[in-house]
Structure formats: C-alpha cells, structure tokens
Image: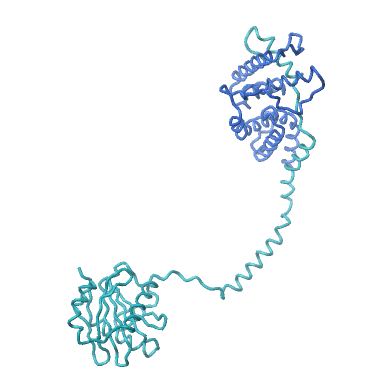
Chain colours: A cyan, B blue
Amino acid sequence: MPDGADGTHDDAGEIGRVLRQRLPRHAASAGFRTSLAHVLTPAPARRAGPPAWLAPAASALAMALVMVLYLAPSLPKVAPPDPLGPWANAVLNEHARTVLWGQSRPDVVPAVLPWVMDEGGVLLSWVFTGDDKIQLVNAYPMYLEGRRGIELAYQDADGHTVTYLILPAPTLALPERGRVQIDRWKPLVRTENGFSMILWKQQGLLCVLVSDLVSESDLRKLKEYFIKVRSSSEPYPHS
Amino acid sequence: MADERFLQQALEHLDALHNLAVYLTRNGSEAEDLVQETYVRALRFSHRFEPGTHLRAWLFQILRNTFLTFYRLRERESTVSENGVPEGDSPMFHDAPGADGERSGIHMDLERALVRLPEEFKTPLLLAEVEGLPLEDVARIMDCPVGTVKSRIFRAKERLRGILKDYGDEPTSTGDAGRG
C-alpha cells in the first residue's frame, strides 16, 4: 500500500498500522445475523408452493363470479345518457301548461301569428290550420331549454289537445333508435309519462307533436295529425 | 440452488460490511439497516455479479452506493460544516470496545478522528488499511482511478494525524498512541 508523498511515508504507514491494530471492529451481532438470514431466506422458500391464502381467495373469487353471472340478468341496467331527456321533459311541461291554462281562440290565431313568429324567432311560410278532425286553436311564443320558439295548439274532435312545438336546435341529432316510418317520413316516436311525442328535424329546427294520445288507436290518430302538420307546415328559422 | 449458494458466500462478508456501515452511518441501527439493504440489493442483482470477480469488493460497492443514496443526504441535513466534515466530536459509538483506561481512550480518539473525515477519505482508508482490499478494488468501489484512491488515502492519513495531534494522541514512531 503506497503511502503518498516522500518524507511522510513512515508517518502514513504508522497511521495505517494503528488503524489496523487499534481501530475497533464492529462485527455484526448474533441477533442481527439471525434476523438478516431470516429476511433474506424466506423468498426462495415462498417460491416452493402457492401461498396459503391463495386457495381460499381463489375459491371466494370463483363463488363471487358465479353469483354475478347468476344475478346479472336481474341487476338494474345502467342506461346510456339520453340526449333527448331534457328536451322531452321541457316539451311535456310546455304541453301541460297549454292543456291547463291555454285558451281556445281560433278566431285570433291569424291576427296573433305574425307576432308569435316574431317573438318566437321561427317563421312559418305555410301552416296547417286544421280540418274537420283537428283545429288550430291558439299560438304562443315560448322559451324552452334556453331557446326561443313557437307553439301551436290544436284540438281534435274528441277534445284532445295536440301541441306542435318548433324551436331551433341545429346541433341536436335525433337518435335512430325509436324512429317509426309514418308515410314518407321517419320521425322519432316516444311515449313518456302518459304522453306521446313525435319528434323530427326540419330546417335545423326541432319539431315536436305532443299529446295525451297514448293508446294504440289514439297513437294512430296522432300519426295522422303528424302527416297533416308535417305536409302542410313549412317552418324555418328567423334569420 | 444458485441463490442460496450466492447468499451463503455473501454472508461470509457480513462482519466486514457491518464494520464499514457503522463507520459510515455512525449509528448502530442505521448500520444494520444499511447492511440489510445492501444484501437485499445484492440478491436482487446477483445475476449481474460476474463469478470469479471479487465478491467482497462488489458488496462493498453496493453498500457504499446505498449509503450515498439513502443515508448521506440525511447526514448532510443534520450536521455538516463548511468543508463537509461532520461537526461536533462527541463519540458516536457507545458500544465501542473499551478495555480500560488508556487503551479505551485510544479507541475513542481514533473513532472520533475517523468520524471527522469526509466519506471520500474515510471509505478508501478503511477499505485499504483496515479491510486490506487491493487499491484496484478500492478504486472500483469508489468509482475513481487508482491514483485518486492513493491520493485520498494519503490525505486521509494526513488529516487523521492532524486530528489525533489535536487530541494529543498522535501515534509515536514506536506505534504506541500515547495520550499526551
């Protein structure tokens, strides 16, 4: 072992000798030696076989899987979010207001319609005013889901109120599921909370025909009203 | 089993590793933690050990790296002087082998002096002089050239001699570390 610079060789060597001879050595205690061996050796032992908890855990897991498979059909299903949900609720509320507090004033409709179109932001180049089975009885501007629109109230011969709502919804896409072929159109038909709705898009507008006609025969009537309204009305957004 | 044989060989160096760990950490329980971590790492990376090379040096290298990674930062946070030497010269080893009187005092002063050396000086000094490792192995452990190791050992001895002189314990030419 070289000891460095000349002249200090002996002193440096002496220091080394003193260190070797007199510096205490701190050997590992027996307790530490035992615990260290214990810490380091279990790993290979564990590899010899599966751990004791594995069998009951696997059994419990298998039982849980069987239970899930057995109960799965009866578990409540999480429905995907309905993009039309808020619209449908708002439409039903508006229809309920019309049924409860709307007035039947077919005589004022021609006079009030320009004001309704102006206030509602929806123009009607053509409008179905009625026939022997259903009559346009009133028109209102409305505010629905943060948008202006117009509402045309009809009443059929049996006294059912049929509300036709039109409002701009350029980004709203109607789902394919639930669409029904009616004449040459394929609108969406929904039945909700005792009401029927027929929804379609026209010129970027959401159009809804809503009524309490829910039975099969009544729904057939509503579809007839839809054909009349759809073919005889031409709404477009106010530019 | 290869692991068991490797562990058995590695454990033959336990006392040497523990001794260095005590001088590095200056704390018995921390030294044991350091040694344990060293063995855990050695086992984990045993596939990297090249048979035929010096297992003892390889273990010392792991121990020192582990110390530098986990312990030295804490040491610096606690007590460090401006030159990197731990401050205070209170004895660190409460269980230092003390026979009686003068001999016990020599042990204490040597340990106190060693404590005041920076790790860069202390480790090569202990490895070369106390553990008797060849300079090439020390250089590998310290991750520096052999020339640097020689220089550090020389400077370590110089510093040690200076510190011992302060204590009045400078070793005499006859080898007796008489107390002044």
Across and down, in percent, residue A93 comes to: 36, 77
Is B5 left, or right, of B85 in this rendering?
A: right
Query: Quick one: A197 or A188, which is closer to the camera?
Result: A197
Identify the residue at horizontal 64%, vertical 16% (top origin). B159
Q: Quadrant of residue B59?
A: top right
Is A157 left, or right, of B134 in this rendering?
A: left
Identify the residue at horizontal 63%, vertical 8% (top origin). A6
Query: Quick one: B136 or A29, which is closer to the camera?
Result: A29
Q: Quadrant of residue A152?
A: bottom left
In the image, residue B5 sits, relative to residue B20, either above or below, namely below
Across and down, in percent, residue A217 comes to: 37, 90
Query: Quick one: quadrant of the C terminus of chain A?
Result: bottom left
Across and down, in percent, residue B39 comes to: 69, 37
Toward the right, the furthest residue is: B100
Q: Quadrant of residue B76?
A: top right
Query: Quick one: quadrant of the N terminus of chain A?
Result: top right
Query: Quick one: B139 or A86, which is closer to the camera?
Result: A86
Across and down, in percent, residue A154 comes to: 28, 85
Q: How many marks?
A: 0
Identify the residue at horizontal 33%, vertical 80% (top origin). A97
In the image, residue B15 sits, relative to residue A225, either above or below, namely above
Toward the front, the furthest residue is: A101
